[in-house]
Amino acid sequence: MSTRERAGIVWVLLAACGFSIMPSLVKITYAHSTFSPMDIAIWRFLLAVPLMWALVLLSRRKAPRKLKSDAPVRQAWLIGMMLSVAVLSAFFGLERLPGSTYIVLFYSYPALVVLLSRLLGESIGARAWLALGLALTGVVLTVPDFQTVGGVDRIGVALALANAAIVAVYYLLSKRALAGVVDVSGASAWMMLGTLFVLALLVPLRGLQMPANAQTLLMLLAIASFCTVLPVFGINLAIQRIGAARASLVSTVEPPMSMLVSMFVLGELILAVQWLGAGLIIGSVIVLQLRPRNRLDISIAHEAG
């Protein structure tokens, strides 16, 4: 393995670490503040967008050749506006669900991409149908009985699956909008700006809470930097070094990492059947990456989770 490839894998793992700790950081923010899901969503992008643009502009200045950005600004902006719905559903879902359950349900979105592709008339092979079956079975196993004491919140599950469905649509739109685009980081920055634009429209309608203590501010900074900017920018650097397919395969470590963080940091109880369900969902993602054509680049979803 070359130095360039090792660097690519390190960037993927750093991105995975950042994304996997977000559910736990959000749960901690809920526990130690009066912030609502909308407050966290707005602050996340209010802090993340300037950081992302600073990195994009810095990387352009350091580039050996000064090339004009080919990012599709209008399309990226519109996709980012749509992503605001996914972001809000994620934070409302995390308000109701254990972080470990949310992240596993969210990772059903590659299978939903397959289903949407079929509905749009694309031919789907046996391997893709197998992946879809694995993912759906995994979802059923991941969600405990609703009727038991302490059972998983129905609305929370619906929000997590809605988030996955919106991200599946986002994937299909991004795949078309970013086809052949070199400046993917720039496109991601425009998408994040589009998301912030929609979220900012909510402020005059409902106001915006200020962080009441240092811990809340630190949590918001961590969510914006380590859980948003690092995964998005890191994945783009990784893809340049090891390719989208390989980066996506390495990214499958995110669900088990997030479950472990939730278990040790938040003290969440994860049943054996839920680990099995998570394994099936991760297996469905791996099966999709083994397709000889039209592999799914699951690494593009970090701004939407």
Image (spheres, rainbow, N blue to C red):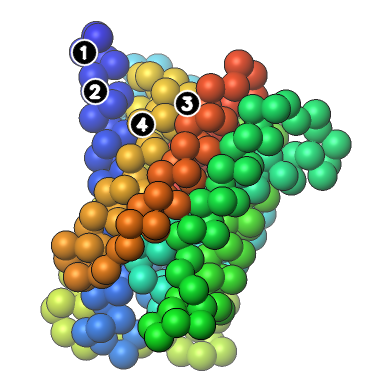
| Contact check, label 2 and label 1, Cβ < 8 Å | yes
Residue 81, image x and y in percent? Answer: 61, 60
User: In this rendering, is residue 44 above or below 243?
Assistant: below
Identify the secondary structure beneath mark 3: helix
Q: What amino acid type should be assigned to the residue bearing mark 4? A: Val
- Look at mark 4 in the image and give the residue it sits on: 250
* C-alpha distance separating marks 1 and 4: 17 Å
Q: Residue at x 47, y 37 (%)?
A: 283
Q: What amino acid type should be assigned to the residue bearing mark 3? A: Ala
Mark seen at residue 7:
2
Q: Earlier in the sequence, mark 2 or mark 3?
A: 2
Answer whether residue 74 is visible to the viewer in this image: no
Q: Earlier in the sequence, mark 1 or mark 3?
A: 1
**Crowd tier of the residue under label 4, counting other residues whose Cα lies within 10 Å: few below 14, some 14–19, many 20 or above:** some
Residue 62, image x and y in percent? Answer: 29, 27
- Look at mark 3 in the image and give the residue it sits on: 244
